[in-house]
Image: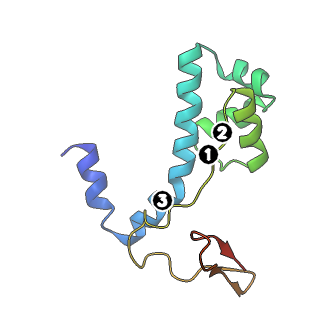
Amino acid sequence: MKVKELIEQRLLDPRFRKAWYELAPRFDIANAMQRYRLEYGISQAELSTLTGVGLSTIVHLESCLVGPHLDTLVKLATGMGAVLEIGFNFEAMGEGEHGTPSIGGDELHEVEGRGGELTY
């Protein structure tokens, strides 16, 4: 069985799917950093100097040991000459997987006619 097939099979399990989508951004960030370093032939230490992000943070992000802070992502993007894009994909987890979101006990509500924008 190929890795892709195994992952597709495991994604049928709701608990696995939830964990997969929670960790996916860490893997995406690590992959982007590693691709950048490979393309430009620089080390983690050189990426640290280029972006102003500490070497230990670079190492932790590339190994997916920690989730990044937004300010760190901005510094990385700026230092690498990129624009940081962040979004939410409500269809990725499938129908009925996300329930009713809340922040501090207040429900989030979709604003009519605003393209799915959420307010609370």
- Asked whether the beta carbons under mark 2 and mark 1 sit within 8 Å of each other, the answer is yes
Residue at 48% across, 59% down: 21
User: First in sequence: mark 2 or mark 3?
Assistant: 3
- Asked whether the beta carbons under mark 2 and mark 3 sit within 8 Å of each other, the answer is no
Residue located beneath label 3 in the image: 21
Residue at 81% across, 29% down: 52
User: First in sequence: mark 2 or mark 1?
Assistant: 2
On screen, residue 93 versus residue 44, left or right, reads: left
Residue located beneath label 2 in the image: 60
> Is label 2 or label 3 in front?
3
Q: Residues within 10 Å of mark 1 (few under 14, many from 20)?
A: few
Image: 46 above or below 9:
above
| Alpha-carbon span between mark 2 and mark 1 | 5 Å
Q: Considering depth in this image, is 113 or 53 the residue closer to the camera?
A: 113
On screen, residue 12 versus residue 81, left or right, reads: left
Residue at 51% across, 81% down: 99
Element type where label 3 sits in the image = helix
> Is label 1 or label 3 in front?
3
Name which residue type carries label 2.
His
Residue located beneath label 1 in the image: 65
Name which residue type carries label 1.
Leu
Element type where label 1 sits in the image = loop
Residue at 33% across, 62% down: 11
Q: Position of residue 55 (x, y in %)?
A: 74, 29
Q: Residues within 10 Å of mark 3 (few under 14, many from 20)?
A: few
Q: Residues within 10 Å of mark 2 (few under 14, many from 20)?
A: some
Residue 75 location, quadrant: top right
Q: Position of residue 80 (x, y in %)?
A: 69, 26
